[in-house]
Image (cartoon, rainbow, N blue to C red):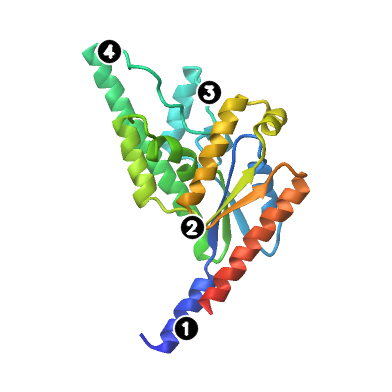
Amino acid sequence: MSAESLGVGLTKMAARGFTVALIGPDGAGKTTIARALEDQPDLAAQYIYMGVNWEASSHLLPTTRAMRALRRVRGIRDSGGPPSQRSGPVPRRPLPRRVVRGAWTAFALANRLAEEWYRNLLAWRHVRRGGIVVFDRHFFSDYHADDVEAAAPRSLDRRIHGFFLSRVYPKPELVVFLDAPADLLYARKGEGTLESLERRRRDYLRLADVTPNFTVVDASKSLDDVTDDVTTAIRSFRASRTAEAR
């Protein structure tokens, strides 16, 4: 490769946008801050929700919309994070029910993988145009503790999902963890318990060991201050990418 072609390649890399994931337990301010970043003219940011709460997402596959409607008929409420691990033995069901349940589990897994890739393709299109995509949550971050690193036995669908997330699915180039004490998070939103919020907080902190660009922002400060800190982190990351490409 000639020096000229190498220089052109590096220039294109510098011009290419990148992805940022805002992660943290409920009450950390992810959605509000991610939306505020869209108002920063120099970032050219595009918001994409990357969680499993279908009520919060404006990008859904038709199959996901159908599953959502079915769940609502059955009175099942969407949650922001991944489903909890089962505790205790699974009751033995009759063969016909096991067949139906197995088919539903396989369909749900295939649809989940398709939904994750669909949203990533939406992000890729904006990144290719030089913009910055801000993820509100991220599938890898939310499912890592349960589907990737869990010490307890995992079901087959969770093992498959964990494999795709850890080995195949693209990771965000910058992860910003909005960190705050569990009691403050609970006071803000009133969801979950102090124990579950603290457990999620520890799960997110462990991601620093498997995430190259992991930044912690103090989310206990005022919303304006946290937004400024996140914006500074994104601008600093962009500046470092540009410097490396020169």
- SS at circle 1: helix
Residue at (47, 81) in percent of width and height: 8
Name which residue type carries label 2: Pro
Given residues 127 and 191, the one toward you in this image is: 191
Name which residue type carries label 3: Arg
Of marks 4 and 2, which one's residue comes earlier in the chain?
4
Q: Is residue 189 above or below residue 18?
A: above
Disc 4 crowd rating (10 Å Cα; few below 14, some 14-19, many 20+) is: few
Given residues 198 and 54, the one toward you in this image is: 198
Disc 1 crowd rating (10 Å Cα; few below 14, some 14-19, many 20+) is: few
- SS at circle 2: loop
Of marks 4 and 1, which one's residue comes earlier in the chain?
1
Q: Name the residue tied to disc 3.
A: 77
In the image, is 82 to the left or to the right of 178?
Answer: left
Q: Name the residue tied to disc 2.
A: 212
Q: Name the residue tied to disc 4.
A: 92
Q: Is residue 224 above or below residue 162?
A: below
Q: Which numbered disc covers residue 119?
A: none
Q: Is residue 119 above or below residue 66?
A: below
Q: Nearer the viewer, mark 1 or mark 2?
A: 2
Name which residue type carries label 4: Arg
Q: Can the viewer see residue 61 in this picture?
A: no
* Label total for image: 4
Q: What's the distance in space between the residues labelled 4 and 1, CA to CA?
A: 63 Å
- The reply to whether dot 1 and dot 2 touch (C-beta < 8 Å) is no
Of marks 1 and 2, which one's residue comes earlier in the chain?
1
- Which residue occupies the extreme left position in the image? 95
Residue at (59, 41) in percent of width and height: 24
Given residues 120 and 234, the one toward you in this image is: 234
Residue at (45, 51) in percent of width and height: 210
Measured as percent of width and height from the top left, residue 60 is found at 48, 40
Residue at (38, 47) in percent of width and height: 166
